[in-house]
Every structure is written in structure tokens, then in C-alpha cells.
């Protein structure tokens, strides 16, 4: 199957600068072995990014405009039978990539690998950073302003699994609790093991769907190991656990429709540690996706 790598160079969803540089750096690194098609989307240089702590809708219009363009292009590429690998950028870019997959494939499950649940609304957000709202938006829970461009099904919360969560805003907890999403915390991973958690996640996200959208946020990894992220959260996954998650995805690549890797911030990296991890994850997924067979029968029902 053909792959396409899409760089989504936006850091508008977070008040900290630098995540927009991640796709550029990683895509330059990938040129050493990836010869397939790629696209790059960059934020408008004329935008004056809001960092106002009292602004609960930071850069809302600019993000919606960026994502609308990203969404339309990914939809076109999926219709041409491409497997999209989207490199962010902050996690707000996944609103476009996940909903693009849902637009074409209609019935889609999702696995959200992240230290945060990203289930805030404009009413519950503490920071006003929109990268804390994407999963709720994708699941159709409020935040409709961030998906005006999407004409199609949202991804159902009952087919959504969060893996690695360990930081949930106080006002966000009820959103998550009553949403119907399944959450496996970092503690759950330590207790049950990666294989068990991923087995359960794929069964939930794959049940009566045409496949799964994967969204992998590098901040799920402990920042002592991967410091190059905008919002680090300690007590995260080990490198071995992070790679085992990716290995599981690779072993079930025929059930995967699309893949994001987000939140690499080169300005916060140390000795290129996070960059190397991100490259390893991407290299594995690219190789697996290029050998992916056209979907015929799902593993999970």
C-alpha cells in the first residue's frame, strides 16, 4: 500500500513555541530512507500567536483554518488509497487527521496514546490551550467550532481508547468519566503489561469498525527519556514500553487506517534524544505501512 507522510507544522494549540518545528526536522531526517510522497503544511507566518493566560480560546480561528486545509488534503489522499502518517505539530492537528479518516472510512475506532486525556471543552479548559481539547472534539463532545469543516460521522467514544494517561484537569474529569471512552493509565500499563492493554484497546477500538486511527503523543514517554515535548509529565512510560506499543501496532497494521505522531518539540530536546525516538517510531510504521495489504477482513469484531 502507498504511504504518504504529512507534516502538520502548527504549534498554535499550545502557548509554548517549538512543536511547529518538529515535522520539518523529522521529515528532513526521514529523507535518508523514505522516498515516497509527502506534503507539508505550515502555519501562516503572519499569525500573531496568542499566549494570553486568560484567553480560553487561544488561536481558535487560526487552528480551525489550518486544520480545515489539512483535513481536506488528507481526505483526498485517503480516497486515493494512501495510508497517511501525519507528523505534528501539537495535538490539535489530530482533529483534522482523525476526522479525515472518519470522513472516508465512516466507521472508525481510535487509540489515543497520551499522558493527557485531551477531553477539555472551552468551558472546562484551565489554560485555553486547544491541544487539550482535540479528543473531545473528535468524539463529538462539544467544541463544534473546531470541526466546522467536517461533514461526516465523528468517532464514537465507545470505540475510543486512551493509553498512558496520568494528567487530567479537574474540570476535565467529568467529561472523561461520562463520555464512554476507555482509559488505561500509566499505572494500568505497569500492572497489566503492554500486551494485555493493547489487546483490550484493539478489541474496543476495532469492534464493528472498519479500522483504527492511531494518535501517538510523545509526551506519553517519561521526560527523562524523551524531554523534547511542550508539556512534559513525569512518571511516564519507559522507552521499552513505548516501543512495544508501536510494535503491537505494527503487528496489527492491517487493522490500522491512519497514524499520527505529535508533540515533538526540538527546542526542548536534549542531545536529540526525543528526535531519535520519534525517528525510530516513524521508521517502524513506514516500513509496516508500505507492506500493508489492502483491507479485506478485520481481526476484531
Image (cartoon, rainbow, N blue to C red):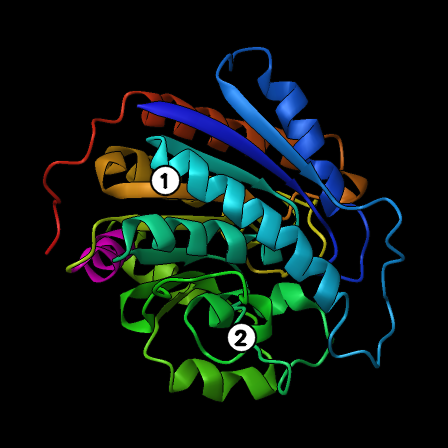
Q: Is residue 287 above or below residue 170?
A: above
The magenta span reads 196-207
Q: Tell me residue 239's x, y (percent).
A: 50, 40
* Residue 172, image quadrant: bottom right
Whether 198 is among the magenta residues is: yes
Tell me if I can see residue 273 in this picture.
Answer: no
269 lies left or right of 117: right
Q: Position of residue 123 (x, y in %)?
A: 63, 87
Q: Quadrant of residue 102?
A: bottom left
Point out the tag, 1 or 2, that comes first from the N-terminus. 2
- Residue sitting at x 36%, y 40%: 244
Which residue is drawn at the image coordinates 34% and 21% (left, top)?
A: 290
User: Eyeballing the image, is 90 above or below 37?
Assistant: below
- Residue located beneath label 1 in the image: 244
* Residue drawn at (53%, 61%) of the image: 149
Counting from the top left corner in percent of width and height, residue 143 is at 56, 76
Is most of the magenta stretch helix, strand or loop?
A: helix
Between 35 and 125, which is closer to the camera in this rendering?
35
Query: Mark 2 highlights which residue?
Result: 144
What quarter of the picture does the C terminus occupy? bottom left
Amino acid at each position: 500500500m502507498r504511504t504518504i507522510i504529512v507534516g502538520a507544522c502548527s504549534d498554535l494549540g499550545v502557548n509554548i513555541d517549538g512543536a511547529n518545528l518538529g515535522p520539518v526536522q523529522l521529515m528532513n531526517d526521514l529523507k535518508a530512507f523514505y522516498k515516497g510522497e509527502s506534503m507539508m503544511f505550515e502555519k501562516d507566518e503572519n499569525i500573531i500567536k496568542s499566549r494570553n493566560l486568560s484567553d480560553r480560546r487561544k488561536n481558535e480561528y487560526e487552528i480551525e483554518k489550518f486544520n480545515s486545509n489539512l483535513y481536506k488534503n488528507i481526505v483526498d489522499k485517503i480516497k486515493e488509497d494512501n495510508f497517511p502518517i501525519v507528523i505534528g505539530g501539537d495535538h490539535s492537528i489530530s482533529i483534522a487527521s482523525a476526522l479525515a479518516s472518519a470522513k472516508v472510512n465512516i466507521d472508525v475506532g481510535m487509540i489515543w496514546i497520551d499522558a493527557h486525556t485531551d477531553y477539555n471543552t472551552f468551558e472546562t479548559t484551565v489554560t485555553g490551550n486547544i491541544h487539550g481539547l482535540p479528543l473531545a472534539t473528535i468524539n463529538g463532545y462539544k467544541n463544534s467550532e473546531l470541526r466546522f469543516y467536517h461533514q461526516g460521522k465523528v468517532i464514537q467514544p465507545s470505540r475510543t481508547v486512551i493509553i498512558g494517561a496520568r494528567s487530567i484537569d479537574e474540570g476535565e474529569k467529568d467529561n472523561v468519566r461520562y463520555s464512554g471512552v476507555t482509559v488505561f493509565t500509566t499505572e494500568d500499563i505497569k500492572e497489566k503489561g503492554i500486551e494485555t492493554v493493547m489487546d483490550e484497546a484493539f478489541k474496543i477500538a476495532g469492534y464493528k469498525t472498519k479500522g483504527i486511527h492511531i494518535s501517538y503523543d510523545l509526551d506519553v514517554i517519561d521526560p527523562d527519556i524523551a524531554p523534547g515535548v511542550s508539556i512534559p509529565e513525569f512518571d511516564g512510560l519507559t522507552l521499552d514500553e513505548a516501543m512495544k506499543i508501536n510494535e503491537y501496532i505494527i503487528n496489527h497494521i492491517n487493522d490500522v487506517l491512519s497514524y499520527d505522531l505529535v508533540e515533538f518539540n526540538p527546542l526542548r530536546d536534549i542531545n536529540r534524544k526525543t528526535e531519535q525516538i520519534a525517528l525510530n517510531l516513524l521508521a517502524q510504521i513506514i516500513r509496516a505501512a508500505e507492506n500493508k495489504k489492502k483491507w479485506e477482513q478485520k481481526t476484531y469484531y
